[in-house]
């Protein structure tokens, strides 16, 4: 065994294992190779004599305390809480009511689907229901009217019958046998003939009295009339009941159908369930499948972080996870994605992003700011370390060569974790021990002191195109008469306000036809007045009908009068004249003929190719352009749409950033017919403020680890690793491992 005894090696007895060690000086000075004399005739540790080194040995490394990081950095962005909205069924998008960058309140309509076919069914069904209701009401009124007198007569007859029953006389009277001349007296027949109780052989016998016979005849007559009339009335009532039941069933069925259509129409309307700002949309006129998001609303008051996907198992195994923004640590809460949702996103080729909730972020953290998620697999405090180059192995045993005065001693060590360059020393060495290493060392030559500053990228691009989603078409509104075009009162690309005259027209009306309608109206009013004076109750239906006709005639006459008096066509909204239809003086315009389009410059976007998606929702940009006089101007803009990196569905991603233009700049762009490429967009991206910056010249990258050589207070130079949050051509910025004021070696 190597460690069966303590092996002491003097300057005269160097082991073969270090004879080939080549030591380099790198960084602050040029490389120096340490050359050793060798004699390979013997292999004994104790007996092999070594010559003095040709030059002083520079390959000693001190055991120092440092952190061994096992950390992964995930670039992230601060995004708002967002809700996406989808139609429950396949729909063709008709129009958006609110666009990206515009505020929305809870309950506001966001987008409408095309409902032309549904509207036709609804209108037809409403007309059918109305006709059914009117027909039934007329039938019901007729039946009720026809039964009014018969039912009153039946009631009178019933009263008579009941009155007769109250005065019913005694049926029988007693007569002597001598008064009975023969024959039978029948109790069952009082309408005439004999009344028989059987044979009367003598003595007194009961017979039906004449008073009873008279009463019975009259009662029977009224009762018969009542029963016949009551039966007729009852038959009519039963028929009305059956018709009513059928009507109620049919009416309820049609109402259910109407309700289903209305609900289906409502499914073509998406409303916001929260207040916020529209942050993404799919586009107008497109056919979308049910369930596919078409619009998103963001609430910037609730801040989240989005980064590349991290599964929940990895999060559970981490020793620490936190966010770093502008040098400040923020606690976060992981939002797991349900497996079914994850699988569906992968199936749909959606960009899967991990979401963290910022637990303690206030107004100082703005939406659109860059951040990093620090994923620490194991939280190591400072521990004794050596470079891997200083470790030697024999079998499974690890050992190092430690300097003891002028001697070199092989010493066993117990090792722990390593970061690919340095390894943890659990036992066998103490801090400050000098160990022979073939790794690189640095000497102090050129240094820099670390300072805090702002780390950033600068993004510059020309806009690709304009997008004006809101515009109105100005049409000829005249319905009655013949409209002749005279002249335009505006020019293309001119700004106009709502109500401003666009064109002058002349309308030739039908004066005779108008007079005829006026006379018809006057006569109708006179006849209606007569009906009211005669008997308003009896003529109620006819009066109502006449009044409806009067209202229609009055509206028609008023519309004709307005049309005949029209001399100009006005702008329906404020904006810039985008186009004018070619018209000559004297051209006849039909109702609905298009004359102009007006662009609403309150909602105008510059579309910017977002290379690498470095512009995020909420990013502030500077817009540079030239005004009418050729002077260079600058305006502030803002990115108002979310992209996949911000966690939005792929279907809502436009593939470009939408920069909302200020109204005055948008008006200028349209009125001067400017090209989008004449607008330059500048932005600061991936910015981290108040972080420790390390010059690129001081950093060595070994694998995926970053290292610098730190000059300690005693003048020693120690190589230390640090966690870098990002880098550009000049600097790395530090997440952990280095502090302000440290002195580091440069190349």
Image (spheres, rainbow, N blue to C red):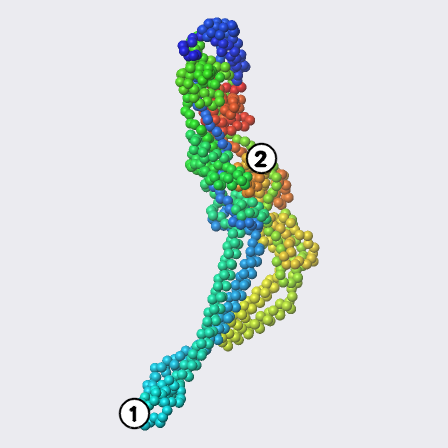
Q: Is residue 223 above or below residue 109?
A: below
> Can residue 54 be seen in the rendering of this structure?
no
Estimate the x, y position of residue 678 in percent, counting from the top left. 62, 39
Q: Is residue 393 above or below residue 524?
A: above
The one of 700 and 596 positioned closer to us in this rendering: 700
Residue appearing at x 47%, y 18% in the figure: 387
> Can residue 192 be seen in the rendering of this structure?
yes
Local packing at callout 1 (Cα closer than 10 Å; few below 14, some 14-19, many 20+) is few
Residue bearing the label numbered 2: 611
> Which element is circle 1 on?
loop
Q: Which mark is residue 496?
A: none
Estimate the x, y position of residue 335 in percent, counting from the top left. 45, 38
Residue appearing at x 58%, y 47% in the figure: 286
Residue bearing the label numbered 1: 203
Residue appearing at x 53%, y 39% in the figure: 346
Q: Is residue 405 above or below residue 486?
A: above
Estimate the x, y position of residue 343 in percent, counting from the top left. 50, 39
Q: Is residue 65 left or right of residue 582?
A: left
């Amino acid at each position: 065994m190597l460690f069966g005894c303590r092996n002491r090696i003097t300057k005269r007895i160097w082991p073969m294992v270090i004879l080939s060690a080549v030591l380099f000086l790198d960084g602050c000075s040029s490389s120096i190779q340490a050359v050793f004399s060798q004699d390979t005739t013997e292999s004994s540790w104790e007996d092999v004599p070594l010559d003095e080194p040709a030059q002083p040995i520079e390959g000693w490394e001190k055991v120092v305390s440092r952190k061994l990081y096992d950390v992964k950095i995930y670039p992230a962005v601060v995004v708002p809480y967002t809700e996406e909205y989808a139609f429950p069924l396949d729909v063709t998008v008709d129009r958006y009511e609110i666009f990206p960058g515009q505020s929305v309140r809870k309950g506001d309509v966001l987008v409408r689907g095309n409902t032309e076919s549904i509207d036709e069914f609804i209108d037809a069904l409403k007309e059918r229901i109305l006709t059914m209701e009117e027909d039934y009401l007329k039938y019901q009124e007729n039946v009720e009217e026809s039964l009014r007198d018969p039912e009153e007569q039946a009631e009178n007859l019933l009263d008579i019958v009941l009155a007769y029953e109250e005065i019913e006389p005694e049926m029988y009277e007693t007569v002597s046998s001598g008064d009975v001349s023969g024959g039978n007296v029948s109790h069952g027949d009082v309408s005439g003939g004999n009344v028989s109780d059987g044979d009367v052989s003598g003595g007194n016998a009961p017979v039906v009295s004449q008073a009873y016979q008279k009463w019975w005849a009259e009662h029977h007559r009224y009762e018969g009339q009542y029963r016949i009339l009551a039966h007729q009335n009852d038959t009519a009532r039963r028929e009305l009941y059956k018709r009513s039941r059928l009507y109620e069933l049919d009416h309820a069925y049609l109402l259910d159908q109407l309700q289903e259509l209305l609900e289906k129409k409502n499914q073509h309307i998406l409303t916001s369930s929260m207040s916020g700002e529209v942050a993404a949309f799919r586009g107008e006129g497109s056919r979308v499948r049910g369930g596919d998001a078409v619009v998103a609303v963001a609430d910037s008051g609730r801040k989240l972080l989005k980064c590349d996907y991290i599964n929940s198992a990895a999060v559970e195994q981490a020793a620490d996870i936190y966010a770093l923004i502008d040098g400040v640590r923020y606690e976060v809460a992981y939002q797991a994605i349900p497996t079914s949702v994850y699988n569906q996103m992968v199936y749909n080729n959606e960009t899967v992003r991990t979401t963290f909730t910022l637990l303690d972020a206030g107004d100082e953290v703005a939406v659109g700011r860059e951040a990093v998620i620090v994923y620490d697999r194991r939280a190591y405090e400072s521990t004794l370390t050596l470079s891997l180059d200083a470790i030697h192995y024999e079998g499974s045993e690890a050992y190092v060569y430690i300097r003891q005065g002028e001697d070199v001693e092989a010493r066993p060590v117990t090792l722990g974790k390593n970061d690919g360059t340095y390894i943890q020393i659990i036992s066998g060495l103490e801090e400050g021990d000098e160990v022979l290493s073939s790794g690189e060392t640095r000497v102090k030559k050129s240094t820099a002191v670390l300072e805090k500053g702002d780390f950033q990228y600068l993004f510059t691009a020309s806009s690709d195109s304009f997008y004006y989603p809101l515009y109105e078409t100005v049409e000829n509104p005249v319905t009655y008469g013949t409209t002749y075009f005279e002249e335009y009162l505006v020019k293309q690309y001119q700004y106009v306000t709502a109500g401003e005259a666009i064109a002058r027209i002349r309308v030739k009306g039908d004066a005779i036809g108008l007079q005829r309608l006026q006379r018809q109206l006057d006569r109708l009013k006179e006849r209606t007045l007569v009906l009211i004076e005669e008997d308003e109750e009896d003529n109620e239906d006819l009066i109502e009908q006449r009044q409806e006709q009067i209202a229609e005639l009055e509206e028609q006459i008023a519309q004709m009068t307005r049309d005949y008096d029209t001399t100009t066509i006005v702008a329906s909204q404020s904006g810039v004249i985008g186009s004018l239809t070619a018209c000559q003086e004297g051209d006849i315009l039909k109702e609905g003929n298009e004359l102009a389009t007006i662009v609403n410059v309150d909602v105008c976007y510059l579309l910017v190719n977002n290379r690498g998606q470095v512009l995020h929702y909420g990013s502030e940009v500077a817009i540079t352009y030239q005004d009418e006089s050729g002077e260079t101007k600058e305006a502030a803009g803002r990115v108002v749409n979310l992209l996949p990196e911000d966690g939005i569905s792929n279907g809502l991603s436009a593939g470009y950033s939408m920069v909302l233009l200020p109204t005055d700049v948008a008006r200028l762009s349209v009125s001067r017919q400017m090209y989008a490429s004449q607008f330059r967009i500048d932005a600061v991206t991936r910015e981290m403020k108040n972080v420790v910056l390390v010059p690129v010249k001081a950093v060595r990258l070994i694998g995926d680890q970053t290292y610098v050589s730190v000059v300690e207070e005693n003048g020693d130079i120690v190589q230390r690793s640090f966690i870098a949050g990002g880098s550009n051509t000049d600097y790395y910025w530090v997440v952990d491992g280095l502090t302000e004021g440290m002195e580091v070696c440069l190349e």
